[in-house]
Amino acid sequence: MQHSIDPDAFGPVGPVMADAVSACVHCGFCLPSCPTYVVMGEEMDSPRGRIVLIKEVLEGGLELDVALPFLDNCLSCRGCETACPSGVPYGELITSFRGVMDAPRTREPVDQVQRALALHLLPHRGRFRVAATLGNRGRPLRRLLPGSLGAMLELLPARLPRRRRLPPLLRARGDRRARVAFLAGCVQEVVAPEINRAALRVLAHNGVEVVVPPRQSCCGALPLHSGAFEQARTLARRNLEAFPDDVDAIVTTAAGCGSGMHEYGLLFDGEPEHATAERFGSRVVDVSVFLQSLGLREEPPELAAPATAAYHDACHLAHAQRVRQEPRELLGRIAGLTLVEPPEPELCCGSAGTYNIERPEVARELGDRKAANLRSTGADLFVTGNIGCITQLRTRLGGLGDSTPVLHTIEVLDRAYARRPLT
């Protein structure tokens, strides 16, 4: 295949970027599914517009600083991939480009501080807990801080849940049907630890033995998607060493984490660990996919009070991992629970990793739009499969004075098994 971009000029990801750029035929099918194009209406804030910008930068015809404002607006939600008839791997393109161009770019001082805080706090549970505790004490000062720093405080829960360690091993209830390793994650374990505990209970209830490797680290998705490839590799290497081989799968409860771990092959392209990383990524599976594939050992009991739930597709579950039906099918197994679909299901809620910190104004607009779409369903609760979405939706709904519960899919199933109310 002939490329106007020299694929050998940008290291192992050069061919990835060249192939992605050449695959785009600029048809425009991606435009309605791109959240920034929908809210901004600018061609350069669309996937095909950004592909043109990336092409020009890689070919040397455009200065990086000219393209960066439009490229930084991208949420990396990958909704365009779902809509694209040509199969353009836009996620691999934007991730690779950010990794290649991270070193030569310059940032404003406030952006440097925000980036440093995100990269050095969020992937480390202990540091993040301390920072979040201090941040909550300074919550009254939120409006006095620059946009991105104030947005960090806005997204924190008013009170952090009590810290409890996950057990290194949880035995299956009854006959063991499977054995899995479990990713604990970082931010989720601080702000919403009940999600992981619900997952462990549901897995054990269905005959699954769960190993929680004690030496595991953050999955590395945050630095990977921010262009900090070396930090991402450091975190990923720890996981390659920490997770055992004698399991049926590596289970995650966060869509962003699962997507990031699936990209370990891209991250280690050209590195000695490439084959190991590819194999590792192929074993990673969302908890909803694993349970639906295994099959529930017993149906959840009927709800004491009927309820209606609106399901929100987390972008890195629906678009990056192509997981849509499994969560809905699991929720459909709960007698008395009616599932409804909100308008504009393809649009991102504005969380997108650290996007709601880096671009708070755009994130708020998208979050408010998603909240309005969910509220229009009249549902009793909202359900999704990613901690970023949960945090974003709770924050935006709270700003509207709406206290409708926002739960993870696995929490709904856990509450149904335990005969606990969903609302």
Image: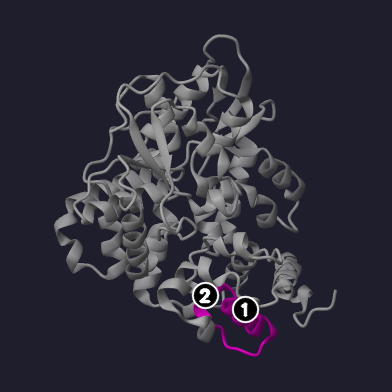
Please give the residue where the numbered disc 2 appears in the rendered image.
Answer: 71
Magenta residues (range) = 44-64
Residue 157 vs 241, above or below: the answer is: below
Residue 58 vs 100, above or below: the answer is: below
Residue 324 vs 230, above or below: the answer is: above
Spot occupied by residue 305 in the image (x, y as percentages of width and height): 30, 25
- Does residue 220 show up? no
Q: Residue furthest right?
A: 1
Please give the residue where the numbered disc 1 appears in the rendered image.
Answer: 54
Q: Residue furthest left?
A: 140
Residue at image position (84%, 78%) is 2
Which residue is at the front of the view, 117 or 25? 25
Q: What SS does tag 1 mark?
A: helix
Instruction: Let me know if residue 59 is in the magenta part.
Output: yes
Residue at image position (41%, 64%) is 115
Mark found first going from the N terminus, 1 or 2: 1
Instruction: Say what amino acid the circle numbered 2 marks.
Output: Leu
Instruction: Let me know if residue 189 is in the magenta part.
Output: no
